[in-house]
Image (spheres, rainbow, N blue to C red):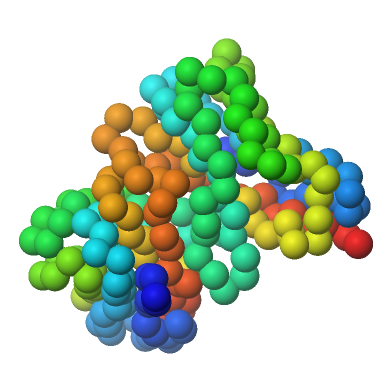
Amino acid sequence: DQQVKQNSPSLSVQEGRISILNCDYTNSMFDYFLWYKKYPAEGPTFLISISSIKDKNEDGRFTVFLNKSAKHLSLHIVPSQPGDSAVYFCAAKAAGNKLTFGGGTRVLVKP
Amino acid sequence: NAGVTQTPKFQVLKTGQSMTLQCAQDMNHEYMSWYRQDPGMGLRLIHYSVGAGITDQGEVPNGYNVSRSTTEDFPLRLLSAAPSQTSVYFCASSYSSSGYETQYFGPGTRLLVL
């Protein structure tokens, strides 16, 4: 039973438009959430994070929103660029510092 | 600065064969871990280590062994490979177990077990 789910396996968006990636979780004990970006043949790299005491965190073109009551977080990329084409994983942490990852969403930004 | 290196990049094994996936980091990180990535499943933690001589199991440890004799190296051993172990394996390191933002991943080892 996956505790972190990314229900959209892929997303295609036009360059300059907004990309919205969604992630749902079931474990109410998760207290920290992260997004990772992964290019082909490379390992994931950290993108942005948010603590459960916040509902929004912004870093340049990337914003993460957390809705604890809905157990839902989303990543907004504005504006989307071709270099953003990658697989994005959301991850969540509960006590014990172990991360639980979602299945990933492949984003394609078309020029 | 090499970061986290993994060898080999790709390996084909027959069922029952053994092999060791190598992982090394040159950042003097205490925390190292191994993940496997399967389609639609994200990354799942296999084993981790909080320092030389200390290892522990993650979410999916069965069929894998690890050891941590030095800070730099954290090899993952498959004693008797099974087709279910076909996956992409990532090694990661960070200064501490809570250093997620500064966790560095290696480029991965793609393993095919026939």
Q: Which residue shows up at 69% across the image and 42% down it?
A: A60
Left or right of A7: which side holds B81?
A: left
- Nearest the viewer among B102 and B63 is B102
Q: Which residue shows up at 46% across the image and 83% down it?
A: B10
Indicate the quadrant containing the N terminus of chain B: top left, top right, bottom left or bottom right: bottom left
| Res A64 visible | yes
- Nearest the viewer among B42 and A38 is A38
Total marks shown come to 0
The vertical placement of A19 against B16, above or below, is: above
Give the percent coordinates (x, y) of residue B44.
41, 52
Indicate the quadrant containing the C terminus of chain B: top left, top right, bottom left or bottom right: bottom left
Give the percent coordinates (x, y) of residue B81.
31, 76
Give the percent coordinates (x, y) of residue A88.
62, 51
Q: Which residue shows up at 17% across the image and 66% down it?
A: B71
Left or right of A21: which side holds B98?
A: left
| Res A73 visible | no
- Nearest the viewer among A61 and B53 is A61
Left or right of A5: which side holds A108?
A: right
- Nearest the viewer among B5 and A40 is B5
Give the percent coordinates (x, y) of residue B103.
40, 54
